[in-house]
Amino acid sequence: MKLSQDWLVKQSVEQRPALLIVLLLQCAYIACKIGALWALAQSFAALLIQRQPVSVETLKILLVSSIGMCIAYAVLAQVRTQLKMTYQQSIHQQLSQDLAQASQHQIRSQSMYAWQQIWLQHIPTVANYLFDFVVQKWLSALIPLLVIGIITAINWLIGIALLVTLPLLPVFMILVGKGTAHRHQAHFQALADLGTLFADRLRNSKLLAQFKHHDAQAKILDQASTAYNIKTMHVLTLAFVSSSLLDFFSTLSIAIIAVYIGFSLLGEIDFGISIQFVDGMFILLVVPLLFAELKRLGQLYHQKEAAIAASAALEVDLTYAPTEVANQAIARLDELVSSTSTPPKPHWIALTGPSGAGKTRLLQGIFELLLRDPSSLQLKVAMLTQESVILPGSIRENVCLDREYPTAEIIHVLTQVGLAEWLLQQPQGLATEMGDYPPLSGGEARRIALARIMLLDVDIVLLDEPTAFLTAQLHNEISGLMHTVFAHKHVIWVSHKGLPPTWFTEQWRVSESGELIL
Amino acid sequence: MTKRLTKPWFSFGIGVIHQIAGLLLVIFATWFLAACATATVGFNYMLPAVAIRALALTRIASGYGHLWWGHQRLFVRLRQTRAALFARLKNTILTGNAELETQLEQDTLSIAGAWVNWLVQHASVVIGLILCQIIIIVLTPHDALIWGGFAVTLALVWAMLLWQSYSVVRALVSAQTALRDNINHTLNSTSLWHLYAQTPTINPVQYWQVYFQVQGQVQRGIVFLLVLTSAGLVYTLTHIPDNMLGNALLVVPSIVFLAAQDWALVWFQAQPELLTFQQSQQRLTHISGVQLKPDSDNGKFEDTGILADGIQTIRWSKVSLPYRQKTYPGIQIRKGVPLWITGSSGSGKSSLLEIMQGMYPKHALCQLNDRYPRFGFHDNWQLVQQHPTILFTSIEDNLRMGDVTLTNEQLQQVLCAVGLTNLTDQLSSWIGGNARQLSGGEIKRFALARALLRQPDVLLIDEPFEGLDSQNQMCIYALISDYAAEHCVVVATHLFPMNVDQDITLNLDDVS
C-alpha cells in the first residue's frame, strides 16, 4: 500500500506540466466567474441605489467575463479529456512493453478478470485521480486564499473574521480529508464484505441447487445484510458529522454575512468600518466560492481510494530474472551445439525429475534465455506447452498466426501432422471459423499446435509435457509424430509419460532440491 | 415511527428539502441585502433575518439527514435488490462471463444507489425549476416568460442528451465486451506469442474513446447550462421596467439565474450515474443461465415405486454433448460396479457427467431399472466436480449443507476417511472466499466428503485423482470402491491408480 502511494506521487510529479495546464484553465474559469460576480454587484448597485439602467461598461465586463467563463469551461473539458487520453495511452504503452517481456507464468499468475480490470478500470481511474483529484486538491487550497484576499481588500474586518472565526483552512482541509476517508472506509468495507458473500453464493448456485440449500442461504444472506446495515449506520452516524461540516460552514457564512452586512447597511450595528452596498453584495456573492472547491474535493475523494487500489493492481511483477539453473542448462546447450560435427547432428535431450522439482520452471527459463538473447547461441526457438490454444479465427489464422504462407504449404504441413482427413470434413476448408467451441478433439488440437511450429523455421523445440492430458494411446501416437517431424531439430522434452530412451542423445535430471544433474 | 422514517419518500423528501433550502437561502439573502440598502423607514428587518437563519438551519439539518437517511435507504434497497435477485436465480446456473457474479454484485449496488445518486438530484432540479418559476411569477412577473423559456430549453437539452446517451451506452457496452474479448484472447494465447512475427497487443483505445464520449456529453450539457444562464443574467439586468428601479425585488430573477449555474449542474453531472443504472438494469434483466428443473417438478418418481428397492441399473440412451457434434450409444451402470469414463481432455467427460446428473435434460434419455421417469436435475445424485467450489463459510456449515442434523463426530469421521484429518479440530473456522484457502487436492477431497455425507443414490465424480499423491490416490480409490458396492458410481478420470477392468471403462476417444 505504501509503495503504491509513492507510485501515485511520482506520477503526479511526472505529469506536473500537464496538471498545471489544467489548473491554469480552472483558475481562468474561476477568475472569469469572479469578474462576472463583480459586474453583477455593480449592476445591482446601479439599479437599486442610483436607480439607473446598468452602464455599458459594466455590461461589457459582465459579457466578456461570462463568455470567458463558458469558453474556459469548454476548453478545460476538452483539454482535460485529451490529457487523460494521452496519459492512459502512455501507461498502456508501458504495460504492453512489460507484457511482451514477461514470461507466460507471470501473466498467468493473475486471473483474466484482474487483467481486464486493468484496462477497463484501473488505468482510467489513475488518470481521473491525477487530472481531477490532484488538480482539485491544489485548487481547494488556492481559491479560498484568493477569495479571502479579495474580501480582505474590500473589508478587512469580514476578511479577518472569515479567516479567524472559521476554522483555519488547513485544519479544515484535514478535517474534510479525515472525515471523508473515515466514512469511505466504513462504507466501502461494509459494502465489500456484503458483496463478497453475495457474489460467492451466486457463484455457487450449482452447489446450492445440488444440496437444496438455496433457501437456507437466502435467509443467511438477509440476516448478514441486516446486521451489517445496523453496524455500519452506527459508524456512519459519527462520520457524517465531519462530512457535514463543510455544508454547515458554507451555509452559515452566507446567512451570517447577509445578516451582518444588511444590519450595518441599516445602521443597526456599527463596528467602525462603514460598508458600501456594492461591496457588501460582492462579498455575499463571492463567499460561496470559498467553500465550493473544498466541497468538490470531498465529492472527488473516492477517486483517491480508487487510485490507491488501482496502483496496487497495476503493480504486477513482470520483471525478468534468469535462474542459475537455466544459465547452467544454456551453457551445456552451448557446448553441445557448438561442438556439433558436420553435417550438423540434432541433439535430443530428455529432461526428467520428480514432480514439483521445477522441470517446467527450468524449461521456461531456458526458453526465456533463448528468446531474449539470441546472440549467444543463435538458435531460433519454439515451445509447446501442455495446453492447446485455439484462437477464435479461421483454421488458416490458427495455423499461420500473423504470417502468410502459400496454401499448398499449409496443406502439406496439415497432412504431415495427420489432419488431412479432418480438414476435408470442415465446411469451408481452411477458412472455417473455429469460434468458441472449436470442432476439435484433444489430439487434433495438439496436431494443430505442431503444424504451427513446423511452418516456422526453428532450430530448437522445447516440449513441456505436450501429451499431458491425452490418453495412453493418443500419447503414443502424438509422441511418435513429434519424433518424426522434429527429427532434424534440437529438442528438449519434459514428459511424465514413457518415451523410448533410444530417441534421446542426452539425459538431464532435475533433483528433488532443484539442482540440474547433467 | 422509526418504520415510517425508513420509507423511501422520507429520505427522498429530505434530500429535496436540502437542495431547495439552499436555493431559497441564496435568493432570500441577496434580496435581504438589497432591501436593507433601499430600506425606507419602518422596514421590518427582524423577520427576514430570522427567516434567513431558519433557512440556513433547515439546510444544515436536512443535509445531515439526507446523508443519514440516504445511506440507510441505500442499504435497505441493496438488501432488497440482492434478496430478489438471489431468489430469482434459484436453481439457475449462470453462464457467460466467468466473473459475472462480481459484475452482478456491482450492478445491484448501482441499482440500489440510483435513489441517492440521481433520483433525488433530478427531482430537486425539477422542483427547483418549478419553484423558481412560481417565485418569479409572483414577485417579478415581467421576467416570467424568460425564466419559463430557460427552464423549458434546459429540460429539452437535458432530454436530448439523455436520448443520445442511449446509443452511447449501447456503444459503451459493446466496446467493453469487445475489449474484454480482446484481452482474453490476447492473454490466453501467451504460449503462442513467440511464434508471431509481431507480439500481439491489446487495443483499449476504442473503448476509452467511447468512455470519454460519455464524459463529453456531461460537459457539453454543462457548457449549455453556463451559456443559457449567462444569457438569462444579461437579459434580466437589461430589461428592468422603469417602475422597478430601486425595488429590492429586482435582484431575484438575476440571482435565480446565477444560482442555477450551481444547483442545476447536478442534472448533467448525475447523468453517467443514470447510464450506469440503465446498464445494470439491462444486464440484470438479461442474465443468461441454465435453469435446473428439479426432479420434484417432473412427476415424482419416488411415487412410481421405482425406488422402492433402490436403483439397480441406470441406462442413458441418445446421449449428445451440448455445443459439440458428438453422440454416444447407450451407457449403462449398475449398482455394485463403478463405471470408469476415460478420454483425453476435451473429449467431453465433464459434460457427460453433467448430462447424467440431469443438467441438460434434452441431451439424454434416462431409464431407471426398467422404467422411464421424466428426467430432470436430481439433487440426491451428487456430482463432485473437477474443480469443486466451496462456500465462503465455516467448515461445518459447508459439510452440513445437505443435512443440518449431522453431528460433529459424523463430520470428523468422513474428513478422516478422505484423508483431511488436519481439518477435524477446526470445524468452526471459515474457508474459501478471502478466508483460509485449501489446496486443489484438499478441495477435491473436501467436496467428496461433503457429497458422501448426503449418502447419494448415485455418485458422479470428475477427476478425483488429479493433484493427489499416490498414497492419497489409493485411499480415495478404496473409498470409491467401497461406496460403489452399495450404490451406483461413475468416475471420470485420465489417471488410474490401479488397473481397472476394460469392460467397466468407457473411452470417449474411441467414440466419434
Image (cartoon, coloured by chain):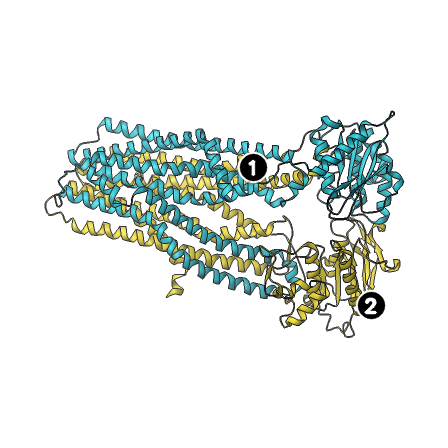
Q: Earlier in the sequence, mark 2 or mark 1?
A: 1
- What percent of the width, then of the height, locates residue A140? 36, 39
Residue A306 showing in the rendered view? yes
Residue type beneath disc 2: Gly
The crowd level at tag 1 (other Cα within 10 Å; few <14, some 14-19, many 20+) is: many
**Residue shown at 20%/46% (left/top)?**
A259
Could you say which is closer to the camera, residue B340 or residue B423? Answer: B423
Q: CA distance from mark 2 to mark 1?
A: 58 Å
> What residue is shown at x 20% (from left), y 49% (from top)?
B49
Residue B142, image x, y percentages: 25, 39
A68 on left or right of A428: left
Colour of chain B, in one word, is yellow
Q: Which residue is mark 2?
A: B336
Task: Give x and y (percent) for residue B431.
Answer: 61, 59
Residue holding disc 1:
B207
Q: Is residue A238 above or below residue A348?
A: below
Residue A480 placed where, x, y %? Answer: 87, 40
- Which numbered mark, 2 or 1, is in the foreground of this view? 2
Chain whose colour in the figure is cyan: A
